Image: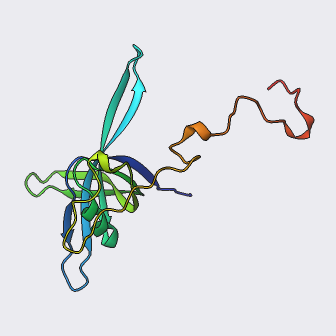
Amino acid sequence: MASYNRVILMGNLTRDPEMRHTQGESSTAICKIGMAVNRRFKNRTGEWVEKPTFVDVTLFGNRAEAFEKYHRKGSIAFIEGRLEFDSWEDKNSGQKRSKLYVVAENWEFAGGRSDGGGGRGGNDQGDAAPQQQPANEGSYGDYSSAPSTSAPAESPGGFDDTPF
């Protein structure tokens, strides 16, 4: 049976990134973050409502270090990765516990500098967050240049009079 495990999220960090490293000679960076991803919809009365979904995300290696360097609570981030399931036995109660989370395989900056995100400020080496580039016309965020779908395309084979 074929499987596909892909997650794409864009949202705000709910806390500062938590950075740790594995022990041993070949230490690996592990960055854990929490994200709030909002779903916006109209309720039965026609009012717009935002419902947040809170997601735990883990990044590893160089991606983790770079993410932690440029993000903090409130930053907007775009994450691409996969779902992972972890289960364990609680040391105190002995009960089985489980958690579904995202392992980030890729991330990108999202939003502008005014969103509270970006860098943590410069350091002595002059490091700063990369500049956010404006979206090009026709990008995902620019629906005004999307092709119009109001007129149907001509059907192949001359079946224009097909009633369905």
- Give left or right: position of 58 versus 121: right
Q: Position of residue 161 (x, y in %)?
A: 89, 26
* Residue 31 vs residue 114, the one in the foreground: 114
Q: Position of residue 134 (x, y in %)?
A: 46, 51
Identify the colour scheme used: rainbow
* Residue 133 vs residue 22, the one in the foreground: 133
Residue 55 sits above or below residue 105 on the image: above
Q: Quadrant of the C terminus?
A: top right
- Residue at 55% x, 48% y: name it: 139
- Give left or right: position of 20 versus 138: left
Residue 21 sits above or below residue 78 on the image: below
* Residue 102 vs residue 132, the one in the foreground: 132
Q: In which quadrant of the rendered view does residue 30 lie? A: bottom left
- Give left or right: position of 40 versus 89: right
Q: Residue furthest toward the left? A: 92
Q: Residue furthest toward the bottom? A: 25
- Residue at 22% x, 50% y: name it: 73
Q: Where is residue 93 in the image (x, y as percent from the top left)?
A: 9, 51
- Residue at 27% x, 69% y: name it: 127
Q: Residue furthest toward the top? A: 45
